[in-house]
Image (cartoon, rainbow, N blue to C red):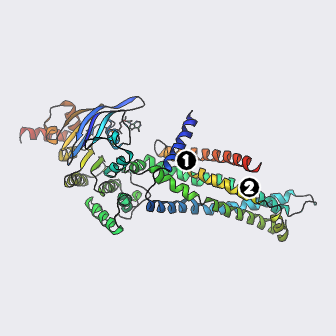
């Protein structure tokens, strides 16, 4: 569980986050949605400790991050899996080396055990036969999947994904969504997903935070977002006509 | 003010580099990779330049020695002094600032803009140590490159002087041994050692703290080359003043 209390962050005087409060629950897929530039990535990077908030508290399982010692912070970070918006694969390493990297750095596994684990994880993200390719030699969608594999290979307690399925075709996107949800349940992970994808919202939105103008304009679940009458939310979520029609039909009970 | 800020930031970076160490087995692999990329990869151009500049120094000296009272062996003496004192340590280091330096800046810089450095930090890895420390260690072998450069520079001088018919082989060898001051070699290698540290860290600084995208990576490399050269030249001046005068 990660609890955020009154989080503020600004860049050169411009306030991007204006006091956020939210609880990201363990064993659930927690979604952050919002327009491009609304500060979703900044929000996530504050939780990761890449940015330091001006004000506010971030608690990991009940303990404020600011009270962690350096050693505890390092230990915490080993338990975090992160999928960056751009993938952030190490471009000097092959696909296999990228995925193996956290194991090599933080575990005492034998080479054969690592190979085995990497193989399983790459299969789970539907990526077979690209082991020895360099990141520059595979497509953007494949890079995304390698990045997910790298984030989950060491069985993290917290999983952060910045748009894990942008740039993927609908089939693969669904596979990835379901995979993230599965492992979240399976290993009781606190998972936070930033997404633009309404399919994901309606599919795996167990808990949703809608970020707008630096505040959380709406929070709820996928069932609630489906029924809500809140105009700011419906304007964003149902900006696509098709979704609007589906929703209207559903609500009328067809 | 911004210069002071950068200098402060540079030393903070160094503190981070020598801070918490990366896992030893991983570090070892990284160091070998850097030696391969930074040192082995530069040998070709260094050998080529050294040989031919040594040759040119010999020809120029020979052509300017018209006084019959001055022995021709002076060509060897002049070549030895200029190669050992300045040409190999300083001139080659400026070339390396262009080759190795911009490679370091652009590789670290592109890791910065594609969030790879953030990815390391998120995992709890000391990215300064992981990225920069192996480069500093790899550059400790740089004095060997300079030793090779000195040897080839003098060899180039010998070949040019003898083939050009300016000096007889035994006269050249005699000239080479004239007034040899061992401390000159010590001086040359002390400054080479300092240069190797500068060549690894100044470009790394420019890459590590860069902001922006792919375009800025290119700009950072250029800036890094300029600053590395400036720092090299100032250090050269300071060590020469301190050690030789
Ligand atoms: N390192 C930074 N320095 C200065 N400003 C920043 C920085 N990172 C983000 N910002 C600013 O914060 C705001 C929010 O950016 P952020 O990347 O969080 O958007 P986002 O919601 O993730 O958008 P997208 O959906 O397009 O990824 C933007 O106005 C951006 O300019
Ligand atoms: Mg973003």
Q: Mark 1 vs mark 2: give the one in front.
A: 2
Q: Quadrant of ligand 1?
A: top left
Residue B140: x %, y % from top left? 59, 58
Name the residue rendered at 85%, 68% in the picture: B171
**Label ID, residue A172:** none
Q: Earlier in the sequence, mark 1 or mark 2?
A: 2
Position of A76 with respect to A221 (left or right) is: right
The quarter in which the N terminus of chain A is drawn is top left
* Quarter of the image where one finds residue A152: bottom left
Q: Secondary structure at mark 1?
A: helix
Say if residue A198 shows up in the picture.
yes
Task: For label 2, count other residues whose C-alpha is less than 10 Å away and answer few (under 14), some (14-19) or many (20+).
Answer: many
Q: Nearer the viewer, residue B8 or A210?
A: B8
Q: How many marks?
A: 2
Say if residue A86 shows up in the picture.
no
For disc 1, the marked residue is B221
* Quarter of the image where one finds residue B2: top right
């Amino acid at each position: 569980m990660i609890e955020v209390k009154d989080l503020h962050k600004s860049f050169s005087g411009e306030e991007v986050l204006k006091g956020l409060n939210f609880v990201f629950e363990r064993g659930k897929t927690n979604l952050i949605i919002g327009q491009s530039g609304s500060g979703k990535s900044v929000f996530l990077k504050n939780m990761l400790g890449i940015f330091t908030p001006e004000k506010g508290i971030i608690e990991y399982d009940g303990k404020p991050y600011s009270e962690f010692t350096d050693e505890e912070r390092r230990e915490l970070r080993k338990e975090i899996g992160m999928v960056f918006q751009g993938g952030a694969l190490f471009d000097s390493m092959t696909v296999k080396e990228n995925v193996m990297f956290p194991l090599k750095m933080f575990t005492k596994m034998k080479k054969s055990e690592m190979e085995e684990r990497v193989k399983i994880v790459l299969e789970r993200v539907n990526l077979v036969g690209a082991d020895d390719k360099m990141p520059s030699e595979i497509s953007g969608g494949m890079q995304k999947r390698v990045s997910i594999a790298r984030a989950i290979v060491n069985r993290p307690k917290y999983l952060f994904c910045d748009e894990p399925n942008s740039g993927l075709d609908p089939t693969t996107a669904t596979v990835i969504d379901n995979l993230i949800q599965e492992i979240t349940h399976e290993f009781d992970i606190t998972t936070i997903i930033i997404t633009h994808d309404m399919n994901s919202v309606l599919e795996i939105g167990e808990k949703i935070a809608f970020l707008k103008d630096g505040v959380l304009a709406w929070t709820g679940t996928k069932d609630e977002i489906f029924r809500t009458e809140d105009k700011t939310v419906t304007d964003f979520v149902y900006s696509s006509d098709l979704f609007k029609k589906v929703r209207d039909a559903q609500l009328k009970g067809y | 003010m911004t210069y002071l800020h950068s200098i402060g930031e540079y030393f903070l970076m160094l503190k981070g580099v020598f801070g918490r160490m990366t896992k030893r087995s991983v570090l070892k692999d990284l160091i070998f990779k850097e030696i391969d990329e930074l040192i082995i990869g530069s040998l070709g151009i260094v050998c080529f330049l050294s040989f031919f500049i040594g040759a040119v120094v010999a020809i120029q000296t020979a052509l300017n020695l018209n006084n019959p009272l001055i022995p021709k062996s002076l060509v060897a003496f002049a070549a030895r002094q200029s190669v050992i004192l300045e040409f190999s340590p300083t001139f080659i280091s400026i070339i390396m600032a262009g080759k190795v330096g911009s490679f370091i800046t652009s590789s670290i810089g592109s890791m910065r803009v594609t969030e790879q450095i953030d990815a390391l930090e998120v995992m709890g890895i000391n990215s300064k140590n992981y990225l920069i420390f192996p480069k500093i260690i790899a550059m400790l072998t740089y004095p060997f490159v300079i030793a090779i450069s000195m040897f080839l520079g003098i060899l180039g001088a010998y070949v040019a002087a003898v083939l050009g018919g300016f000096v007889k082989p035994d006269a050249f060898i005699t000239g080479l041994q004239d007034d040899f001051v061992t401390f000159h070699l010590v001086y040359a290698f002390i400054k080479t050692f300092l240069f190797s540290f500068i060549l690894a860290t100044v470009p790394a600084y420019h890459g590590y703290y860069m902001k922006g995208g792919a375009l800025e990576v290119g700009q950072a490399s250029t800036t890094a080359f300029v600053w590395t050269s400036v720092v090299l030249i100032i250090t050269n001046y300071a060590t020469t003043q301190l050690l030789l005068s």
